[in-house]
Amino acid sequence: MGEHSILEIAEALQSGIPVEEITYVAGTVFKSHDIGRVYEPLILPDFEQVQTDKKAYADSFAIQYRNTDPFTARSLAESYGNRGYVIQNPPAQPLTEMEMDDVYDLPYTGQYHPMYQKDGGIPALKEIKFSLTSNRGCFGSCNFCALTFHQGRILQTRSHESILKEAVRMTEDPDFKGYIHDVGGPTADFRHPSCKKQLTKGVCQNRQCLFPSPCKNLTVDHKDYLKLLRKVRNIPKVKKVFVRSGIRFDYLMADPDKTFLNELVKYHVSGQLRVAPEHVSDEVLKYMGKPKHAVYEGFLKEYEKANARTGKQQYAVPYFMSSHPGCTMKEAVKLAEYVRDLALRQNRFRIFIRPLQLFQLVCTIQRSILLQVRRSTCLRILMKKRSREL
Ligand code: SF4
């Protein structure tokens, strides 16, 4: 995100550096005719080329995909012919816990801008007004999700104190009815980096932390999140604390200690737990970078047991994605039958339209391609014509 960059630009301007010379700030992009001053840039295919040549477009994406980590990314340059280059500096370093706390300690009004008053405000604000952000980033890095580009795979978290301070402030709001709707982030149950290595060397470019199975270096631990939830629900005037951000169920299943699951079920589910298995076909799940369907089935069993243990009768409501690349009529029928048997409502579906991620690329190219997206992983994807029928 942009906090480091904003500060660095402000400091440079304050010290009198002309704006056209502030081209070195991590996390920013600038225009130049001269790339000689940029340190070892990677040259992307020209803008003209990527507009017409799908292979060039794929190559450009692959380079950008491999250069999203602040520890390992290089500057990227894309030519716009005689208009010069657009140069993208490597991403800014993630915020430390103290910096995250400072950001959330700013005097936000928690209100929409007065310009929306005439339209009756912003309805979505009601959903988030009493929600707490606990983290940024996601090491799940599903192939359809653009979050890796926005926030990166390195987890950044706020301290308990910072979150509790905001929670107490919420309880003083005249509209507060005792319910905190969420304590989460891109993935609710991630509260620390996936492994120690990434704090100094960045995340692995050639592998994912949870796919196809949890990495042996992955730190699986829900203790900190558990402690945080306990503290929030013990704040005076708080009746209930819900977790509405997605729980990564394969991460939860990798944790042998089921205390978190038990307390989640007992205190933090509002009747239905929203989960995102995304599909039921292992073939499609493989393309999505999601765990096999058996992992979801295993989670459902554990969830049921936890409900039985705590005397609750709550459901898991799955979200599925149709039309994802790799999904042919066969897989679509499999999903449809699963959904029919569960008698799910239609609004639990989303059509695959995620922008700017690996599988959006496959949609765009619409033919068999060979992507060398990760350094050592060749991923051959057959984009079958039939999938377009879905
Ligand atoms: S070593 Fe494993 S857990 Fe750490 S960044 Fe790489 S894939 Fe993720």
Image: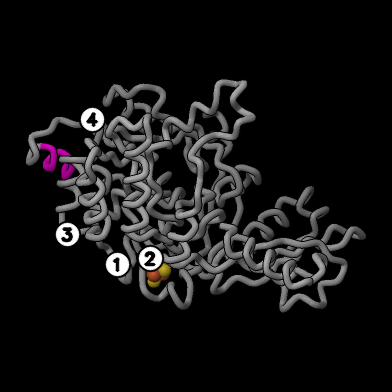
Q: Amino acid at mark 1?
A: Thr
Q: Which percent across, then down, holds residue 111?
A: 51, 36
The residue singled out by tag 1 in the image is 219
Q: Residues within 10 Å of mark 3 (few under 14, many from 20)?
A: few
Kindly tell me whether mark 1's CB lies below 8 Å from ligand 1: yes
Mark 3: amino acid: Pro
Q: Earlier in the sequence, mark 1 or mark 2?
A: 2
x 34%, y 32%: residue? 176
Q: Is residue 108 above or below residue 371?
A: above
Q: Is residue 377 visible?
A: yes
Find residue 193 and name its label.
Answer: 2
Q: Amino acid at mark 4?
A: Gly
Residue 352 placement, left or right of 89: left
Q: Is residue 161 left or right of residue 267?
A: right
Front residue (pair 168, 202): 168
Q: Are marks 1 and 2 in contact (CB under 8 Å)?
A: yes
Numbered tag placed on residue 256 in the rendering = 3
Foreground: 230 or 28? 230
Residue 121: which quarter of the image? top right
Per the rendered image, the range of residues in magenta is 298-307
The residues tagged by marks 4 and 2 sit, at their Cα atoms, a distance apart of 30 Å
Is 256 positioned to the left or the right of 149 in the image? left
Q: Are marks 2 and 3 in contact (CB under 8 Å)?
A: no
Question: Which of disc 4 and disc 1 is earlier in sequence?
Answer: 1
**Which of the two discs, 1 and 2, sits closer to the camera?**
2
User: At 42% from the left edge and 59% from the top edge, which residue is drawn?
Assistant: 139
